[in-house]
Amino acid sequence: MRREEIVERTEAGERDGAPEEDIAIAEFSITPERGLEIRAEEMLRQMEIADARLDIEGKSRLGESWDKAMTWGKAGWEWAKRPSETYAEALGKAALFSAGTTVFLAPVFLYRNCKQVYDARRGERGQQFAGA
Amino acid sequence: MDNFTQQGEQEIIEALGISASSPELQAKVIASFGKILFKRLLLLLPDAVAKDVIAEITALSLPEGMQRLIPLLDLHVPDAGARKSEVLEATIAEFRLL
């Protein structure tokens, strides 16, 4: 069996029928990239477990309020991913990430978002002048 | 995706050691990481305060709510700045690939 084929079979989880020595080889033949993906997938699984544990803790402490907060938090995360349209929104995102990330990153986010709004508005003004 | 999110996400992705993984997987990890962080920060508040905060922020628009939440954390959690950093660092350390 070719090395690439062993790797492919291992990645696809199709070990059934492969001789033991091939499986042993395959375990040492996973590419570094695929190895990272496997470990990142495991990280994701651990995060899901931690998330479920937090839900149990949150519900036991805060009851129905917890569910409301989670609905709001989910919407908040979606909002954070959208481009800012106003300076107030840019400020809100910076405030969010000052809690979610280290405080010193907030001014960076604020600057980048305000610059984004400034550039967009300058572009709009440029178009207005060009059209006039 | 805007620059703000890319910058914030990139910091976390690098801290977690998954910058070489696929963009799809990175997006999933970031979404999960954000949820966990949000919940852990909320649980820093005393229960009675947390219930009030939840009632208050869910009645607000998202930008207003976010701006309201941060000072409340600062107000009700002793040494809030350090605790927030602590939660962030602990969450990264818990999941980071070695």
Image: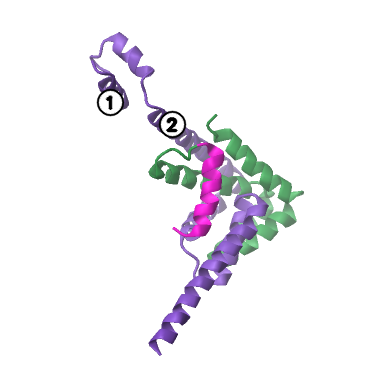
The residue labelled by disc 1 is A8
Q: Residues within 10 Å of mark 1 (few under 14, many from 20)?
A: some
Given residues B40 and A107, the one toward you in this image is A107
Is the residue A122 above or below the residue A7 in the image? below
**Label 1 residue SS:** helix
On the rendered image, what quadrant is the N terminus of chain A found in?
Answer: top left
Report whether residue A31 is seen: yes
How many labels, in total? 2
Given residues A12 and B84, the one toward you in this image is A12
Report whether residue B66 is seen: no
Which chain: purple?
A
Chain B colour is green
Is the residue A102 above or below the residue A130 in the image? above
- Pointer 1 or 2: first along the chain: 1
The residue labelled by disc 2 is A36
Q: Which residues make up the magenta segment? A: B1-17
Specify whether A130 is left or right of A80: left
User: Of the residues shown, which amino acid type is indicated by label 2?
Assistant: Leu
x and y, in percent, of residue B7 in the image:
53, 53
Q: From this viewpoint, which residue is outermost toward the right? A: B78
User: Of the residues shown, which amino acid type is indicated by label 1?
Assistant: Glu
x and y, in percent, of residue A50 in the image:
53, 37
A35 magenta-colored: no
Colouring scheme, one of rainbow, by chain, secondary structure, one colour: by chain
Q: Residue at x 37, y 23 (%)?
A: A30
Q: Residue at x 68, y 42 (%)?
A: B86
